[in-house]
Amino acid sequence: MILKLRNILFLTIVGFALASCVTSRKVNYMQKPDKQIPSYADTLSFEDYVLRIGDRLYVYVYSLNEEVMRMYNAGGTNASQMRQQMQQGGTYGSYDLYTYLVDEEGMINFPTIGKVFVQGKTTREVKYLLEDQLKTLVQEIPGYSSVSVEVNIVNRSFSIIGAQSGRYMINKEKMTIFEALAMAGDLGEFNSRKEIKLVREKNGVTTIKTFDARSEDIVNSEYYYIEPNDIIYIRQIPGYSFGINHVTTAIGVTAATISFGVFIYTIVQTGINHVNKYYGKDKK
């Protein structure tokens, strides 16, 4: 009986251990598409981000005229240093003085110009729009010189839920899904790369896209680049809250579990034998 139980426990634990193994197939990126890993059509495209309500813009005006610089740049604040600090994220704080909020009407309120409609435009289009209007205004300033405008979106971010959950800053113009995952410290062994969900809002419409990050074809697909305000949802691999990723670990767990099972069975069986023996004597 003990031998039979030992065999059953052995087969059960081995099956569990094998099912719990996290193989390289489940966690490696850039794998060739096959029956388990999908192939994505070549739909790669990167469109310049268009401004939305709630975005904040950092605008810096360049001119050889110091009066113009002081008028629009808070006393000539260093542009590159200020932009770098704001792109690192954090709270706005005093940066409110140097940024322009896209309000509910899709406008920013720019000094001497007033309301400027920017919603749905790229930063490049806003740059040209402001330059055209400023050139007309500064012509009235003595010692006039042409102006150039730099426009950047500050505090652009994306969010990850499920693995290293948090909000992360986009610190470059184009950020790939792999760079985004790397910023979050990758996914770990027990998080699914097979069904990553991407929640994206565009033109007032929210869409949910699902893709397999293990496929090498991802680099040519619409999923390769992320956008500001994207939400990336990572789910845990079903049944892998406990997992085994090494053969030696599997063998050790199997042996320890069998030994424990046999130990418990021996104690229970010994108790049953004693009970039977005791009651057997009473009957006699």
Image: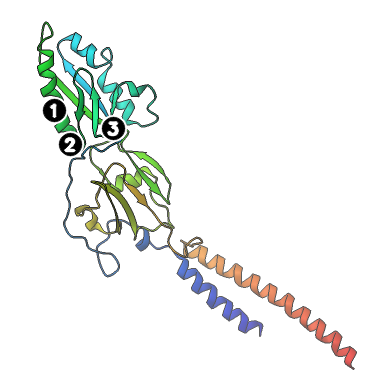
Q: Amino acid at mark 1?
A: Leu
Measured along the vertical axis of the image, is residue 228 above or below residue 57? below
In this view of the protein, which residue sits in the foreground, 187 or 96? Answer: 96
The residue where tag 3 is placed is 103
User: In the image, what residue type sits under mark 3?
Assistant: Asp
Q: Note whether 32 is above or below 51 in the view shown.
A: below
CB contact under 8 Å: marks 1 and 2 = yes
Residue shown at 30%/38% (left/top)?
170
The answer to whether mark 1 and mark 3 are in CB contact below 8 A is no
Identify residue type, mark 2: Lys
Q: Quadrant of the C terminus?
A: bottom right
Q: Secondary structure at mark 1?
A: helix
Residue assigned mark 1: 129
Which quarter of the figure has residue 33? bottom left
Label 2: which secondary element: loop
Position in image of residue 61 (x %, y %): 19, 19
Q: Relative to 207, is 147 on the left or the right?
A: left
Q: Quadrant of the N terminus?
A: bottom right
Percent of width and height locating residue 55: 29, 34
